[in-house]
Image (spheres, rainbow, N blue to C red):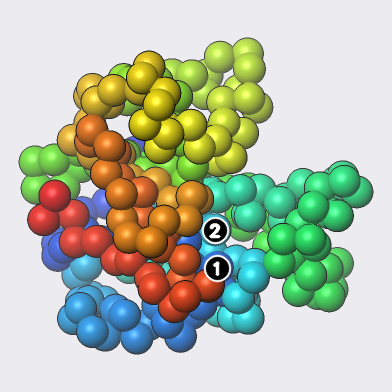
C-alpha cells in the first residue's frame, strides 16, 4: 500500500472527518445519528488512532470494511504493526492502551497488523471543488505537494514516523510553520485539545473521545 493515497471514488453526499476514535465505537455511532449521517452517500474519514484505550477495538477495526468509512494510519495503528516485530514497541503499546491486542490469537494479531499496514499515512480527497489533506499527527512541509513527495525520499521511514508521531506544527512558538499551500485544508488528530484547533489552514480535531466522551466530527463543507 502506498504511504500516500489520492481518493478516487465518487462521493455523492457530504464529506465528514472524525477525530481519534480510540475504541469508542458506540460513541461514534451515536454521534453519526445525531448529525444525520447518510450511510448510503456520505463519506467519513478518520484521522487515525481507531484503537487502544477504549473497549470496542474490534468494532472500530471492522469500520474499515464499510464503504462509507476510511482512515489514515495513526501512531496506535503503527504500534500494532511494530509491536509484533519489536519488544520495545510492544512494551510501549501495552503501556498506552494496547493490552487488548496481545490477548488476541497470533493469527488475529497478524491480520489486524496487515490491515493497518495497508492504510495510507497521508490521504488527499477532492470534494466539491476543494482539496483536503488528512494526516494523523503532523505535516512538516508548508507545501502539500512537497509533503507528499517526502515519502518517496530515501528517508521514507522518517517521513512516515514524523507524520504519525510529530506534533510541532500545533506549537505557535514554532514560526517556521505557515499556511500549507496546494491544499485547502489539512486535518489532523493525535494531540488532544479541549476543542478543535486551527492554525493557518490546519485543523486538529482529537478532542479526547476516550477521555471525556467528546468526539469531534466536522462537516468539511463548512470550512
Residue 122 circle label: none
User: In terms of depth relative to the viewer, which is nearer, 123 or 196?
Assistant: 196
- Residue 215 on image: x %, y %: 38, 71
Crowding at dot 1, Cα within 10 Å, few <14 / some 14-19 / many 20+, comes out as many
Tell me the residue that label 1 is attached to.
22
The answer to which of marks 1 and 2 sits earlier in the sequence is 1
* Furthest-right residue in this view: 87
Q: Residue at x 46, y 71 (%)?
A: 209
* Furthest-front residue in this view: 173
Instruction: Say left or right for 54 vs 90.
Output: left
Label 2 residue SS: loop
Tell me the residue that label 2 is attached to.
49
Q: Is residue 28 visible from the viewing direction of this image?
A: yes
Label 1 residue SS: loop
Crowding at dot 2, Cα within 10 Å, few <14 / some 14-19 / many 20+, comes out as many
Instruction: Say left or right for 195 vs 94.
Output: left
- Residue 60 on image: x %, y %: 53, 73
Does 19 sit above or below residue 30?
above
- Residue 136 on image: x %, y %: 47, 46
Q: Are marks 1 and 2 in contact (CB under 8 Å)?
A: yes
Q: Residue at x 13, y 40 (%)?
A: 130
- Residue 181 on image: x %, y %: 23, 22
Give the CA distance from mark 1 to mark 2: 6 Å
Number of dots carrying numbers? 2
Amino acid at each position: 500500500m502506498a504511504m500516500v493515497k489520492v481518493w478516487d471514488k465518487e462521493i455523492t453526499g457530504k464529506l465528514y472527518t472524525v477525530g481519534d476514535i480510540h475504541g469508542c465505537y458506540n460513541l461514534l455511532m451515536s454521534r453519526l445519528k445525531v448529525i444525520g449521517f447518510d450511510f448510503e452517500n456520505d463519506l467519513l474519514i478518520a484521522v487515525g488512532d481507531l484503537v487502544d484505550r477504549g473497549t470496542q477495538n474490534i468494532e472500530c477495526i471492522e469500520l474499515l470494511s464499510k464503504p462509507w468509512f476510511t482512515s489514515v494510519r495513526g501512531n496506535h495503528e503503527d504500534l500494532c504493526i511494530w509491536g509484533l516485530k519489536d519488544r520495545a514497541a510492544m512494551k510501549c503499546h501495552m503501556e498506552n492502551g494496547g493490552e487488548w491486542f496481545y490477548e488476541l490469537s497470533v493469527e488475529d494479531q497478524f491480520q489486524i497488523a496487515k490491515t493497518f499496514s495497508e492504510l495510507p499515512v497521508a490521504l488527499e480527497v477532492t470534494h466539491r471543488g476543494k482539496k483536503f489533506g488528512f494526516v494523523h499527527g503532523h505535516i512538516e512541509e508548508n507545501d502539500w505537494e512537497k509533503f507528499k513527495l517526502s515519502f518517496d525520499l530515501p528517508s521514507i521511514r522518517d517521513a512516515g514516523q514524523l507524520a504519525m508521531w510529530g506534533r510541532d506544527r500545533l506549537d505557535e512558538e514554532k514560526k517556521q510553520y505557515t499556511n500549507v499551500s496546494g491544499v485547502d485544508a489539512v486535518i489532523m488528530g493525535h494531540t488532544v485539545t479541549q476543542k478543535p484547533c486551527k492554525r493557518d489552514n490546519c485543523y486538529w480535531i482529537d478532542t479526547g473521545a476516550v477521555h471525556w466522551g467528546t468526539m469531534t466530527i466536522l462537516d468539511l463543507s463548512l470550512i
